[in-house]
Image: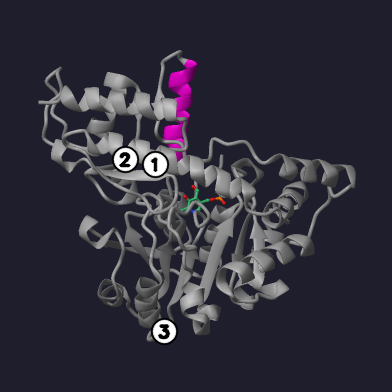
Amino acid sequence: GPAPAERMSRVKESPSSRVADRVRDFQAAGRKVLPLTIGEPDFDTPDHVKEAAVAAIRAGETKYTSANGTPALRRAVTARLLRKTGQSYGHDEICVGGGAKQLIFLAFMATLDEGDEVVVPAPYWVSYPDMVTVNGGRPVIIGTTAAEGYKITPERLRAAITDRTKWVVLNTPNNPTGAVYSEAELRGLTDVVRAHPHVSILCDEIYDEINYGAQPVPSAVTVAPDLRERVFLVNGVSKAYAMTGWRIGYGAGARWLCGAIGTLQSQSSSCPSSVSQAAAVAALDGGREFIDRTVGVYTARRDLLVSGLAAIDGLRPTTPEGGFYVWVDASALLGSVTPSGKEVTSDADLAEHFLDTSGVVVITGDSYGCPGHFRASFALSSETIREAVAGLARAVESLR
Ligand code: PLP
């Protein structure tokens, strides 16, 4: 029978999907778990968005659309990008796909030849390196430190660029650290890219509306409009509008790139879901009420989780500027010993100890290319966050 292709050896299941399955297994077995792993808003999709989907179904908007999305959705995306970046994108400089995730995958498929390099700052979203390797590329990981705010500097970027570099991935706000690049920091990085005409920036801005700063999250294209053709902006409705299951993301960039992505969609999915696209139009055109309200709730939860974790001896949380995750330095706990006499030698050992002691599930730092840490989500009720903090405190105190 058919055997897996060689390329399957270059990709593994996403650690966040795997851990989500594990949480479901535990819950199904009747065990109480406190899943600080959650990677999606716990809010319901806004009612007006659901109504728009129902209206689309009733109106017969239930057929294939154009591969890169309906005119209505591309207009809504254009309007949103004009508000955010000051750049006016044409219809054929926009692509809509089944989530930001699919568009990033297709962008790599459309551009990477065997051995091409993609610079990925660590800690990174778990999917970037695998998306690069499965499409024939080579991820070039650059580490960042807490002292640098987990952000790459122009010097480090310059040092990582070779003749084979195609892309630099910038994720702002960052998953998992919550770091947001300032305009000045983006300018430093775009200056480096400007000097290397064979390099482009893939700017993943999926968390840009979950923003705790006073100013909107800056975009690479705003600080360097002259590089517009070499910046691929990726965003979507999943996180901002609690629409993860609707599977709609969008990209903006060079006409040829959006065209290539459209070609790949036309030969794979045909197009994103027509009904979900109608819902996404309502979300993008629907004003900021939902975002303002939910960001208010996230802010309170963020403060609760950060202050709770900071009070635990051995854990050092970073306060996120965006997104709904706290990145925690737990390196002080490596080398300690559990009450049953087991030495904690890895992130996995530590996570296992948290789970055994108090049912708290976290995603290990090594999944993000940064061992000695873990990611804790606060897309959860304050009640769950309080219980989880108490559980983590118990688990950490029990270590010798
Ligand atoms: N980019 C980052 C950094 C993410 O964390 C996620 C979701 O976890 C995505 C992209 C994918 O979002 P979408 O639901 O639009 O595919």
Helix or strand or loop: what does disc 2 sit on?
A: helix
Ligand 1 within 8 Å of disc 3? The answer is no
The residue shown at (64%, 64%) is 80
Indicate which label's residue lies in the foreground, 3 or 1: 1
Which numbered marker is on residue 306? 2
For residue 74, which quarter of the picture? bottom right
Q: Camera-side residue: 393 or 298?
A: 298
Q: Label 1 to label 2, Cα distance in Å?
A: 6 Å
Which numbered marker is on residue 302? 1
* Residue type pointed to by label 3: Arg
Q: Please, is residue 23 above or below residue 144 in the view?
A: above
For residue 331, which quarter of the picture? top left
Helix or strand or loop: what does disc 3 sit on?
A: helix
Q: Label 3 to label 1, Cα distance in Å?
A: 36 Å
Which numbered marker is on residue 159? none
Please identify the quadrant where the C terminus is shown.
top left
17 magenta-colored: yes
* Residue 97 rendering spot, x and y as whole percentages: 65, 57
Helix or strand or loop: what does disc 1 sit on?
A: helix
Is residue 130 something that shows in the picture?
yes
Q: Which residues are magenta?
A: 15-28
Q: Camera-side residue: 122 or 139?
A: 122
* Residue type pointed to by label 2: Val
Contact between marks 1 and 2 (CB within 8 A): the answer is yes
The residue shown at (56%, 55%) is 100
The residue shown at (31%, 24%) is 355
Indicate which label's residue lies in the foreground, 2 or 3: 2
* Dominant SS type (magenta): helix
Label 3 belongs to which residue?
A: 194
Contact between marks 2 and 3 (CB within 8 A): the answer is no
* Residue type pointed to by label 1: Arg
Relative placement, left or right, of 62 versus 231 is right
